[in-house]
């Protein structure tokens, strides 16, 4: 599931795979090389939200 | 050209009778309804997942955005020793933790009908063709012959004769008449994905702007 967050450092968009983010992956800003990752404290919240979102998306398709 | 030909079909009549509302409007309405249902689902998901509901002291419901913690690691140029300006500065990796609303990381606008295209082509053709072929042939033939003998004493004579008559006449008449007309009616309806509502975009922008790292002044 792809999304994007604007880099807090230079405002360039950073493409992010939400499942990768939940899995502990880091994403680099192509402009300023800043590294963005999810803090371990929030892994459960995002993981739960991604699962719910996938269910909603599946309902919308079906 | 023959005097009376059947009339060609009226093109306007053919198109007037079509249920254009059903043909074009129905699929578009179905897509709009689907989009509306998805928008309602999206709103419910947004309120249930991305916001935490809490009651205020006066009994009102208050939605507070669910925040997630993100870590940003970036290189910051720092002087090696502030007292020695001649020294080359070095890049130090600085880790910043910031709160980000969960709402901003979910691809909410993906829950929508992104493209509806209805193409309707109709072609009406009408043609009339007439072919007449007339041929008259007449032949007349007559043949007659006769033979007679006349004799008297030593004299005798024979007379023969024939008469013939041949006559023929023909006439041909060819007529070809053709007329045609055709019309084409083409309708294309395109509905694209609309952007997120301005209010949602404003909230996301406000949240996004608030996550810029702030440099803490160093203690003197």
Image (tube, coloured by chain):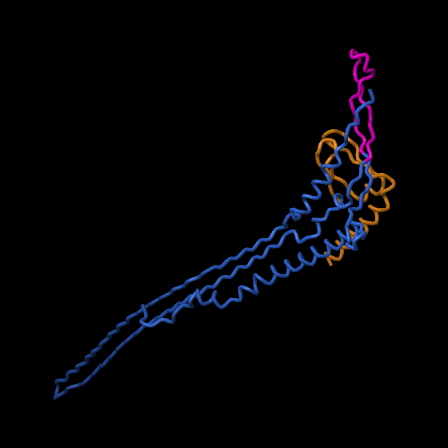
Chain colours: A orange, B blue
Q: Nearer the viewer, residue B112 or B120?
A: B112
**Does residue A52 sit above or below B136 in this rendering?**
above
**Does residue B119 sit above or below B212 in this rendering?**
below
Rendering coords of residue B66 (x, y %): 80, 46
Viewer can see residue B18: yes
Rendering coords of residue A47 (x, y %): 83, 47
- Which quadrant does the C terminus of chain B fall into? top right
Q: Residue at x 33, y 67 (%)?
A: B175
Indicate the quadrant where residue A9 lies: top right
Q: Nearer the viewer, residue B188 or B44?
A: B44
Rendering coords of residue B179 (x, y %): 38, 64
Number of marks in picture? 0
Going by the image, does A48 lie left or right of B155? Answer: right
Rendering coords of residue B46 (x, y %): 75, 51
Residue B13 lies in the magenta stretch: no
Residue B73 lies in the magenta stretch: yes
Residue, far bottom: B153
The span picked out in magenta is B72-97
**Does residue B114 sit above or below B217 in this rendering?**
below
Q: Residue at x 65, y 60 (%)?
A: B33
Residue, far front: B58
Going by the image, does A51 lie left or right of B40? Answer: right
Viewer can see residue B53: no
- Which quadrant does the N terminus of chain B fall into? bottom left
Q: Residue at x 79, y 43 (%)?
A: A18
**Does residue B1 sit above or below B69 in this rendering?**
below
Q: Residue at x 78, y 22 (%)?
A: B77
Q: Nearer the viewer, residue A45 or A37?
A: A45
């Amino acid at each position: 599931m792809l999304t994007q967050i604007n880099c807090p450092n230079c405002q360039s968009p950073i493409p992010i795979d939400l499942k990768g983010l939940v899995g502990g992956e880091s994403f680099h800003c192509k402009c300023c090389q800043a590294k963005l990752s999810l803090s371990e404290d929030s892994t459960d919240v995002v993981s739960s939200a991604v699962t719910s979102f996938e269910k909603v998306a599946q309902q919308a398709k079906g | 050209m023959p005097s009376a030909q059947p009339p060609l079909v009226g093109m306007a009549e053919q198109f007037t009778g079509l249920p254009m509302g059903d043909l074009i409007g129905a699929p578009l309405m179905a897509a709009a309804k689907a989009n509306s249902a998805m928008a309602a689902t999206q709103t419910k998901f947004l309120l249930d997942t991305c916001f935490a509901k809490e009651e205020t002291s006066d009994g009102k419901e208050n939605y507070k955005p669910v925040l997630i913690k993100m870590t940003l690691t970036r290189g910051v140029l720092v002087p090696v020793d502030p007292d020695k300006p001649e020294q080359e500065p070095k890049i130090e990796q600085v880790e910043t933790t910031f709160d980000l609303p969960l709402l901003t990381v979910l691809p909410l606008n993906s829950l929508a009908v992104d493209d509806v295209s209805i193409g309707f082509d109709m072609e009406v053709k009408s043609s009339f063709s007439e072919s007449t072929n007339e041929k008259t042939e007449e032949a007349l033939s007559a043949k007659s012959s006769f033979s007679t003998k006349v004799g008297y004493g030593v004299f005798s004579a024979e007379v023969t004769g024939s008469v013939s008559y041949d006559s023929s006449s023909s006439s041909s008449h060819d007529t070809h008449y053709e007329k045609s007309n055709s019309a084409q009616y083409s309708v294309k309806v395109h509905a694209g994905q609309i952007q997120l509502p301005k209010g949602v975009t404003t909230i996301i922008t406000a949240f996004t702007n608030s996550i810029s790292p702030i440099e803490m002044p160093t203690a003197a």
